[in-house]
Image: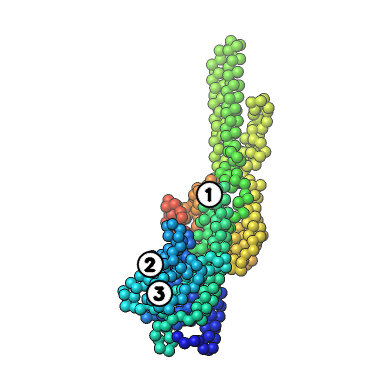
């Protein structure tokens, strides 16, 4: 090839500039690699080219993409033919550098190799090239091999071009020194772009790993909460996708890009990250009297003491009769009858508190009155101290209206969302993830403004936060691994959720899509126990019109 004209050099510089801009804006690494090779071919009028990437252990070069115009060959890359080509080792088993293959030589010595005619050079092993030529009736002549290094000088790949061609005659020719300089410049820019993308990818992977690390910490504290942190983002994305596909109704405008999906997924994973600061005994409180242990066993002991005292009183009365030499069988029988009545009363109270302690049913006013009555029973401890049967704290916990948490513990649990918001707002989120704190921090808000922590109303909340609110509630209703309840069936869960749609708790339009698109069923088939998946009569769901 003759020396390049000033116009040709200007064209190449323009191509190099265009590629630089593309390298800066393109975040698709496979496509990026292919564009690098195609640009290098175009710039030097090369007939073919191959791009290698270094293996993870940095001990070999891995085939990535190969192009050849004359042979109409397209292997690897984004859409090329899949091919299994052996790696080129950079070192042998003894740790000695491989200098036989041109690509390995260029990689090991960080030097470009420009060969005018591979059939006249005896330095390298071109047996593979000769076999290729023979197999495809091709003639490899010139070869330009350029290593690609990152900003720290680490090898990331090798760019190899085959058969420069004269643009006027189309005949194979050699790669000029100018060709080499341009390809070296291109390889340098490409390496920087690739390294940047890899660093971004590594940082994203690191961040995702840290997120999962937080959830592992929560999971270790409470395996029940851990599964919640896994399932809520799954259900959130299912409902979000259903809303995205809706083309009619109040939510027809809602669409999501890939970045939007990533943002919502991240919020879903992190929606309960604040629970890492919640005490385990509160998160895992499975009964009303549980702290470090279930204090119902202390009440069992007291009930046994009451029974013992009742029996002792009767025995003392009988002893008094015998000591007075009074043989009154009727009186003795009455004492036995009274004892059995008293023991039955004590045992009934014991079973009542034992059942109440489970928190599986709502506590009625009648129950509260009975708790107050039992609380005032007198009893004497083993040390002779007399007191009421229940302490103030025990009475307060047993009087919890629903569930197992008292007011103070409920406040501790609710505080997790405030901690979540504080944690997330403290992070320097990139632009495409800046809404994560709002989405994750809004899943306990309500449409009517009665939610927490900010008391937002529906119009103040994003669609994403409202979607997550539904996912959070439905997962909690159907979860069968909670320490304080059994998982509800689909029908039971949808009826409760439907009532929430009617009373201003959740968004009725989102609930309509949740049912109409059968998001509930998709989730159930993936995560719920088969015994919970019953036949749902959608016409009977409150707040839903089929």
Q: Of label 1 and label 2, which has the lower sequence position? A: 2
Most foreground residue, 3 or 354: 3
Does dot 2 land on a helix, a strand or a loop? loop
Mark 1 lies on a secondary structure that is: helix
Give the residue displayed 58% in from the left and 36% down from the top: 296
- Which residue is located at x 56 percent, y 80 percent? 17
Q: Up-down: is 325 above or below 80?
A: above
Checking the image for residue 121, the label placed there is: 3
Q: Which residue is farthest top?
A: 325
Residue 139: x, y in percent?
A: 35, 78
Q: Would you name the residue on which mark 1 appears?
A: 224
Is 425 positioned to the left or the right of 350 in the image?
right
Which is more foreground, mark 3 or mark 1?
A: 3
| Residue 85 image label | 2
Q: CA distance from mark 3 to mark 1?
A: 68 Å
Q: CA distance from mark 1 to mark 2?
A: 48 Å
Q: Which mark is residue 155?
A: none
- Image spot of residue 509 (x, y percent): 54, 66
Q: Is residue 201 visible?
A: no
């Amino acid at each position: 090839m003759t020396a390049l004209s000033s116009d040709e050099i200007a064209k190449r510089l323009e191509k190099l500039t265009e590629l630089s801009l593309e390298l800066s804006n393109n975040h698709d690494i496979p496509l990026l690699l292919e564009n690098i090779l195609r640009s290098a071919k175009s710039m030097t009028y090369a007939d073919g080219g191959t791009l290698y990437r270094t293996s993870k252990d940095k001990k070999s070069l891995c085939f990535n993409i190969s192009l050849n115009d004359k042979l109409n060959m397209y292997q690897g890359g984004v859409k090329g033919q899949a091919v299994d080509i052996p790696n080129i080792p950079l070192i042998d088993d003894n740790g000695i550098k491989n200098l036989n293959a041109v690509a390995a030589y260029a990689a090991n010595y960080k030097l470009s190799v420009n060969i005018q005619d591979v059939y006249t050079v005896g330095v390298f092993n071109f047996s593979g090239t000769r076999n290729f030529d023979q197999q495809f009736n091709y003639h490899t002549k010139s070869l330009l091999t350029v290593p690609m290094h990152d900003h720290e000088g680490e090898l990331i790949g090798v760019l190899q071009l085959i058969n420069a061609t004269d643009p006027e005659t189309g005949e194979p020719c050699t790669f000029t020194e100018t060709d080499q300089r341009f390809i070296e410049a291109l390889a340098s820019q490409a390496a920087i772009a690739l390294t940047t993308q890899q660093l971004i990818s590594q940082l994203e992977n690191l961040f995702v790993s840290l997120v999962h690390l937080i959830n592992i910490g929560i999971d270790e504290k409470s395996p029940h909460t851990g599964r919640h942190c896994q399932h809520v983002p799954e259900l959130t994305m299912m409902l979000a996708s259903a809303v995205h596909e809706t083309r009619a109704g109040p939510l027809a405008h809602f669409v999501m890009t890939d970045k939007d999906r990533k943002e919502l997924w991240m919020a879903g994973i992190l929606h309960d990250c604040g629970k890492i600061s919640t005490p385990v005994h509160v998160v895992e409180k499975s009964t009303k009297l549980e702290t470090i242990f279930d204090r119902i066993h202390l009440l069992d002991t007291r009930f046994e003491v009451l029974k013992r005292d009742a029996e002792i009183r009767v025995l003392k009365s009988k002893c008094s009769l015998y000591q007075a030499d009074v043989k009154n069988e009727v009186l003795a029988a009455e004492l036995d009858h009274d004892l059995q009545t008293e023991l039955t009363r004590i045992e009934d109270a014991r079973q009542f508190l034992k059942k109440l302690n489970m928190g599986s049913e709502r506590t009625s006013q009648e129950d509260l009155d009975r708790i107050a009555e039992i609380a005032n029973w007198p009893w004497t401890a083993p040390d002779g101290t007399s007191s009421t049967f229940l302490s103030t704290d025990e009475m307060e916990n047993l009087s919890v209206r629903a569930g197992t948490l008292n007011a103070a513990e409920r406040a501790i649990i609710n505080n997790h969302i405030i901690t979540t918001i504080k944690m997330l707002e403290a992070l320097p989120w990139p632009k495409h993830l800046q809404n994560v704190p709002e989405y994750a921090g809004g899943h306990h808000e309500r449409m009517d403004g009665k939610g927490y922590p900010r008391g937002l109303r529906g119009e103040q909340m994003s669609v994403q936060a409202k979607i997550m609110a539904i996912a959070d509630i439905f997962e909690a209703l159907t979860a069968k691994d909670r320490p304080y309840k059994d998982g509800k069936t689909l029908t039971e869960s949808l009826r409760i959720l439907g009532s929430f749609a009617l009373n201003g708790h959740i968004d009725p339009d989102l609930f309509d899509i949740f049912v109409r698109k059968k998001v509930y069923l998709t989730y159930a088939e993936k995560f719920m126990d088969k015994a919970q998946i019953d036949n749902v009569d959608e016409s009977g769901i409150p707040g839903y019109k089929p």
